[in-house]
Image: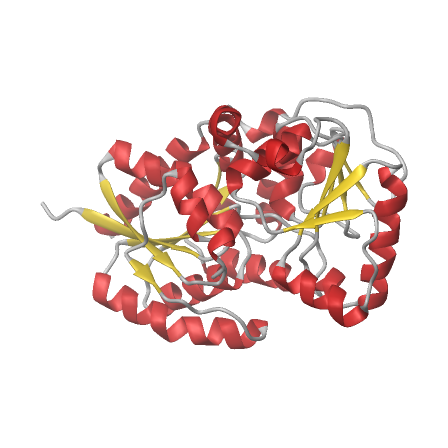
Amino acid sequence: MTTKCIVTVVGARPQFVKAAPVSKAFLDDGRVREILLHTGQHHDALMSAIFFEELGIPAPAHHLEISGGTHGEMTGRMLPVIERVLRDEQPDAVLVYGDTNSTLAGALAAAKLNIPIGHVEAGLRSFNRAMPEEVNRIVTDHLSALLLAPTTEAMTNLQREGLGELSVHVGDVMLDVALAAAAIAERRASFLETQQLTAGEFVLVTLHRAENTDDHARLALLVDYIREQAAGRRIVLPIHPRTARSMEQARIPLHGFDVIEPLGYLDMVQAVRAAASVFTDSGGLQKECYFHRTPCVTLREETEWVETIEAGWNRLWHTPTYRPRMTIEEYGDGHAAEAIVECLVQLIAAADVR
């Protein structure tokens, strides 16, 4: 019997993190061979290769080294190369994660070749189509044969869009990662020591979304807001390359900020766990803050992770107070990866029957 295989398309930091437990679950399960395709969307070693090393992800079988350019240009350059890989590998399914250009390109290439698509983090909606990530998510969901939803809110969104029959609530794979990474970070991470920081006496900041970095007036406003909210604590900013360029172009002063290079995943886990609070425009980091029970302020006008706000661990920056804090049960029990693999095995088996 021929071994079934799946091509997993990743390209950006959050996807490397999410892929780690799922790749391990594929290996442990043994029924489907996973082939990892890295588009190269994040090409900086600190934002790419280090995650494979720290999280124990198998080295990619294909590395496309495609990055830079506009959203349309990047997606367009990825499409023919991903298509060529899929034609060569002949996978039984394609797996994509989240909301990046790599996600959209992988889904489009697979759909054109009539290969079933599984989408991890399906159904999340910010309802702001000015965000490229929102468009990527919506298009990918409507191309996919299997929608792996992390929350009940995501399931509701998919049902509303007529995709309920293709959807499964598997929980959040990031909880799987957080539980495993916290213990490893305690042993291996050196962030606090290297930066000479004390737990609870600093705030952590990440800024990278185009809606914030491309609007220089907004970026300056956010910098002032964070400085005010930090209330005299040290402000640690692992700076994204896009943000660094925008700060320089706009000549925005960063007095009071400790600007450092992007962190490896384990150092970031230690930083989140030790911070008094986190200010971020990242989607995934909002949840990581909840997993590690660190208060979060989201530097956006909306969030896909509405349950983090309802549970009182997150708030939008223009909202002055948090709601009462609660536990978020729907994120699951830390075994989303196994559920995802089981659903994909069933998807491939069903395609064989047809």
x 51%, y 72%: residue: 74
Quarter location, residue 244: bottom right
> Residue at the spot x=36%, y=43% of the render?
57
Left or right: 318 as drawn, with respect to 161:
right
The quadrant in which residue 10 appears is: bottom left
Question: Which quarter of the rendering shows the N terminus?
Answer: top left
Q: Residue furthest left?
A: 1
Q: Position of residue 343 (x, y in %)?
A: 37, 39
Coloration of the structure image: secondary structure
Residue 51 screen position, x and y as percent: 45, 45
Relative placement, left or right, of 162 versus 222 is left
Q: Can residue 166 be seen by looking at this rendering?
A: no
Residue 312: percent from left, percent from top: 77, 29
Q: Position of residue 18 (x, y in %)?
A: 47, 42
Residue sitting at 37 percent across and 75 percent down? 80
Q: Is residue 98 visible?
A: yes
Residue at 82% x, 35% y: name it.
233
Position of 248 compared to 90: left or right?
A: right
Number of dots carrying numbers = 0
Q: Nearer the viewer, residue 168 or 100?
A: 100
**Front-lying residue, 127 or 12:** 12
Q: Nearer the viewer, residue 1 or 76?
A: 76
